[in-house]
Image (spheres, rainbow, N blue to C red):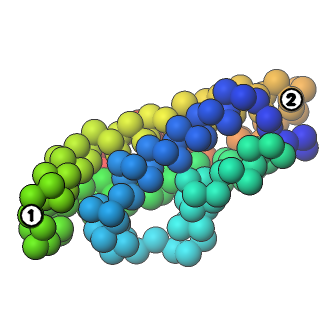
Amino acid sequence: MQPVKDPQIIRLVERISDHYRTNISNRFIRPALLQLSLDKVTWDQIEVLTEKFEQFRYQGFHLDELYRQIAAAAKFIHAVRRDVAPSLKYKLGSGGTSGTDKILRDMAVNNFSFNLQLFADLLYDLYIKLAEIDVSISKGKKPLYQQIPELSDIGNQLVGGV
């Protein structure tokens, strides 16, 4: 299958990556996220999507790999909504921060649920755009996204709550 080089997809992946690094896995929130019990494969998929996307910018993205990365990120979001978000302030405590760091940490914590939902919405947008491309290139055959079991409930995982 031909790699996806659509500029809109590339921009969206870049936006997802920037948002994740800035608002989800930043230096204030990361300690709570590292307590999640996700398998190494899931963490690796998230890392490729959010940290290593530059290597795919020019050669394109493989549809199946992007789908798996989205599924891993959806699994992450579900776990965060269930295990981290409800008690984030408690889990991070005051952390001995003061001054500007305390203000930035409080902002990160107070906006976390909104930022997590925005991350989920961006991932869902990516999924929808990929599915459209997938249908157009499958030419009457079963699209790839319908063949990946992890994607069967992706809408509920990303758009829905816990």
What amino acid is labelled 1 in the image? Ser
Image point (72%, 28%), residue name? 7
Residue 147 pos. (x, y %): 74, 47
- Residue at the front extreme, as displayed: 99
Report x, y in % for residue 116: 35, 45
Crowding near the residue tagged with mark 1, few <14, some 14–19, many ≥20 C-alpha atoms within 10 Å: few
- Say whether residue 30 is left or right of residue 6: left
Q: Gap between marks 2 and 1, in whole Å?
A: 54 Å
Q: Nearer the viewer, residue 97 or 138?
A: 97
| Left or right of 104 on screen, residue 34 | right
The structure residue drawn at horizontal position 60% and vertical position 53%, both measured from the top left corner, is: 49
Mark 2 surroundings within 10 Å by alpha-carbon count, few (fewer than 14), some (14 through 19), many (20 or more): some
- The mark found on residue 98 in the picture is 1
Residue 40 versus residue 157 in the image, above or below: below
Give whichever of discs 2 and 1 has the lower sequence position.
Answer: 1
Q: Which residue appears at 37% of the width and 72% of the height?
A: 34
Q: Please indicate, yes or no, whether residue 4 appears anywhere in the rendered image.
A: yes
**Residue at figure coordinates x 17%, y 68% from the top left:** 92
Whether residue 86 is visible here, answered yes or no, is no
Q: Secondary structure at mark 2?
A: helix
Quarter-of-image position of residue 25: bottom left
List x then y, in percent, for residue 22: 39, 49
Q: Which mark is residue 137?
A: 2
Q: Is residue 126 above or below residue 70?
A: above
Query: At numbered mark 1, what does the secondary structure look like: helix, strand or loop?
Result: loop
Q: Looking at the picture, tell me which residue is in the foreground, 30 or 139.
A: 30
| Quadrant into which the N terminus falls | top right
Q: Is residue 82 left or right of residue 59?
A: left
Q: In the image, is residue 102 above or below residue 61?
A: below
| Callout 2 amino acid | Ile
